[in-house]
Image (tube, grey):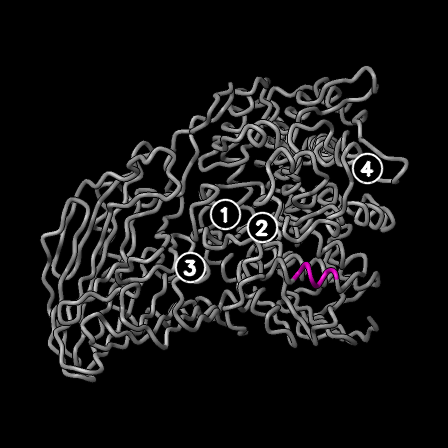
Amino acid sequence: MNQDYIKANKWSIIEEGFDADRVKSSESLFSLGNGAMGQRANFEETYTGPSFQGSYIAGVYYPDKTRVGWWKNGYPEYFAKVLNAPNWIGIKLFVNDTELDLATCKKVSDFRRELDMKEGWYKRSFNAILQNNVEISVEVVRFLSLYLDEVGAISYKVDVLNTDATVVFEPYLDSGITNEDSNWDDKFWNTTHMATAENRAFIEAHTMKTNFSTCTFMQASLDYKGQDIKGTFGTGSETYVSMSFSQKVKAGEQLTLTKFGGYTVSRNHADNQLIDAAHRALDKASTLGFSQLLQKQIEAWAAIWKMSDIVIEGDIKAQQGIRFNIFQLNQTYLGTDSRLNIGPKGFTGEKYGGSTYWDTEAYCIPFYMATKDEKVARNLLKYRYNHLEKAIENAEKLGFSNGAALYPMVTMNGEECHNEWEITFEEIHRNGAIAFAIYNYYRYTGDYSYIPEMGLEVLIGIARFWHQRANFSTSKCKYVILGVTGPNEYENNVNNNWYTNYLAQWCIHFTIEQIKKVKEGYPKDYNRVLGKTNLTPNECEEWEKVADNMYFPYSKEHGVFLQQDGFLDKELVRVSDLKKDQRPINQKWSWDRILRSPYIKQADVLQGFYFFEENFSSEDLEKHFDFYEPFTVHESSLSPCVHSILAAKLGRMEQAYQFYLRTSRLDLDDYNKEVEEGLHITSMAGTWMSIVEGFGGMRVIGGTLSFDPRIPKQWELYSFKVNFRNRIIKVTVSSNKLMFELTGKEKIDIKVVGKEVKLIPNRPVSIEVKH
């Protein structure tokens, strides 16, 4: 049974009624972020019930020493953890000397949370009867500013309802923070300095080992009947500083505490200038005030939604799901800093270390290419180029040479920091996803400049890796790739994973093609790259020999490529024949049993058919889909979106719709029973692809943008916009009509269901269809 307490709403995530068992899940679902920092939706006031505290700063991490039972050569020495940062949101509240704590109140009523995705703010309100029988009403509004991305803002309103009372607010900063997922319970932060000035406080702290210097800051003010009530600073401790505001009020009167807070970081400022930078950020925030800063937030989100919104009519849950996904993607990454990337949990939790995975290249880049300026996607590719030397070092640690590059499965700074051997050493298909992203970027944007400037060096390093990783099998008279883990992580240490072998072949051919193209069109870059890499024609011939003679496991009986050599040795029991109480198998079965089973965690062979669909016929796709999907348990967040796209291509709209609903509401409905650990940010980009590439049938074929739209029967209409080569195209699909609108100055030719359509700016084109 999936959770169902989130109210259906087109623009908001809403929870009504207080339930302590839901607190940790809601802390994830109502998370906030602005690309520079983020936080789970923890209560500002003290809460002694089960909670997962989490505030995070983009790019700040700690190298937690690897903890394994048996060390193997090549293991990364640490697992890079996104750090739970010093807490700036805290506000203790006392009424007649009794502290507000929803875990101990006599009664909590009218509890309501709302995350307004359209405007980018989070509101929480409730009535509570405290242990001393004082009844209060509380309304809290919080947001992380897109306009001033070092600043967050809180408005905390309290009404005392049934008696006269003395109300005390204690806003505070706390750097005595730990991570829930620490391997060794290490101390991650070292607090170095504390300062106060009027109504402002500052804690300077640096991370252990990585030495990121930070200043956590706050400014607080209390309003009572339009008067500014003065506060005083408490005694504090080495890691804690607070202010105290005390005011006597009569029954029915209201107090409002306004708190600005946030972080300045040595990534952006000199170490000795962090407090000065914090003062400047607070000066700007306080000059605007809470209301005007909130108005700036609303305007910034309006600009984001203008381009990235997807409208669905006739299906509120589907509409809410896609907007939640788009909202969280934009909270996580806005593309303004090429030093940053997109962690699988974003700013919503600590699992996966918050680091960069192949998810970025395989799932996220299409979203950012189409909904923002192409520079944003280019920055994601630049991130990998900047880490090329580390990728070469990673490969050297595993015994590769001559500039072969193996990009990490998990990273913060380019070094591998994933410590499960079957992933670290074997899930090497990640290299291919990076090469594919380079191809995909050029295919979509038409911007070839990245390849001669940066991408060719990356491709050469990757091709060298594949050349060395393959070995010649005398029995098969083919090159094979042994001991790997494909996208289906429910098979480890297998031979000749079809997807991995296919990627290796494709990467080599694509790299050789780009070498020739750069040589002919960009001779200066070609000579520079050759000088840097010492590439020779003979080496390219050796690569080509491997690619042209790559082995692909195939079953004549079933007429399909095999996921790996031994797949048919398994007992092929379909998922539909599994008892429901055995699901999910990753929580019910031993790992040994999973590895011996035919069950597939996510698209594996079908991932290849998604990437390279132009190389296979519809009949090929249908045959492989029908063979592999029945064995797929979809226990990866990345699974439903690919299957939705492929099902739509096959015209299986009900199946495509169900997969779409699962990917779009994966967290809202908590399909995998793990949302309290954080949201699945990178798979959210797959949700966007499910609509645009799946239902919308968007492709780039021979440099031309093409659409083959379909619509689920549950929907009356859907629409989306894409930025294709600096032209904004709005696509609207209903059951009997397609509408295309072009904005800008330049016309463009597109294809719709295989036929050429000329689009002229501000002249909508309507096409009658029968689905």
Please report contact status of discs 3 and 4: CB closer than 8 Å, yes or no. no
Amino acid type of the residue that numbered disc 2 sits on in the rendered structure: Cys
- Regarding mark 2 in the picture, which secondary structure is present there? helix
Q: Earlier in the sequence, mark 1 or mark 3?
A: 3
Q: Earlier in the sequence, mark 1 or mark 4?
A: 1
Q: Quadrant of residue 747?
A: bottom right
Q: Which residue is mark 1?
A: 342
User: Which percent across, then down, holds residue 702?
Assistant: 78, 50
Residue 672 visible within the image = yes
Q: Quadrant of residue 170?
A: bottom left
Amino acid type of the residue that numbered disc 1 sits on in the rendered structure: Ile
- Residue drawn at (22%, 74%), measured in percent from left and top? 256
Please report contact status of discs 1 and 2: CB closer than 8 Å, yes or no. yes
Q: Nearer the viewer, residue 481 or 743?
A: 481
The 10 Å Cα crowd at callout 2, few under 14, some 14 to 19, many 20 or more, is: many
Alpha carbon separation for disc pair 1 and 2: 8 Å
Q: Which residue is mark 3?
A: 31
Q: Nearer the viewer, residue 722 or 418?
A: 418
Please report contact status of discs 3 and 2: CB closer than 8 Å, yes or no. no
Q: Quadrant of residue 545?
A: top right
Please report contact status of discs 1 and 3: CB closer than 8 Å, yes or no. no
Alpha carbon separation for disc pair 1 and 3: 16 Å
- Regarding mark 1 in the picture, which secondary structure is present there? loop
- Which image quarter is the C terminus in? bottom right
Query: Where residue 561 is drawn, which disc sits there?
Result: 4
Magenta range is 655-660
Q: Which residue is mark 2?
A: 364
Compared with 169, 410 (above or below) is above
Alpha carbon separation for disc pair 1 and 4: 33 Å
The 10 Å Cα crowd at callout 4, few under 14, some 14 to 19, many 20 or more, is: many
